[in-house]
Image (spheres, helix red, strand yellow):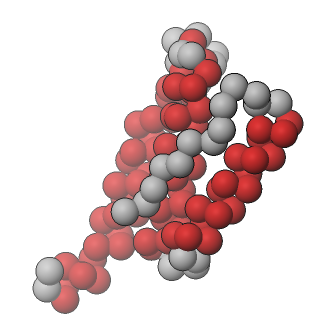
Amino acid sequence: MNEVQRRAFPQRLDRAIDEAQAALRPLFDSVNGAGVYHLPAEKQELLHEIMLKLGMLRIVMIHCDETAENVHRRWLGLQSVRCRVGRTDDAPRRLTLS
């Protein structure tokens, strides 16, 4: 990657994340009744996790606010709270940022 490409990469990545989130967002629309909420719970959770991980990707790769490990640790903490509040089906899944 040359210097111009290296400087442009964060903007390209930011746009790609926005596009991915925008493409997935209609699946969470419960008004029309044809979205993610008709899937089994584990698949619903996976799609929610993907949306969250896209946001985490932005934090780590573009804004460089935190390391991937710190963001993942915080995400695991949120998952454990969700488990205590109402989920009893299984342990949180781990998706990794590579």
Q: Is residue 51 visible?
A: no
Q: Is residue 94 visible?
A: yes
Front one among 44 and 4: 44
Residue at image x 36%, y 73%? 10
Please provide percent x and percent y for residue 23: 41, 37
Q: Is 9 situated above or below 16?
A: below
Residue at image x 86%, y 36%? 85
Q: Is 87 situated above or below 31?
A: below
Please provide percent x and percent y for residue 25: 51, 35
Q: Is 92 situated above or below 3?
A: above
The answer to which image quadrant residue 62 occupies is bottom left
Residue at image x 60%, y 66%? 71
Q: Quadrant of the N terminus?
A: bottom left
Side of 1 relative to 26 (left or right): left
Q: How many labels does the image show?
A: 0
Q: Which residue lies furthest to the right in this view?
A: 85
Q: In which quarter of the image is the C terminus?
A: bottom left
Side of 96 relative to 72 (left or right): left
Residue at image x 27%, y 76%? 8
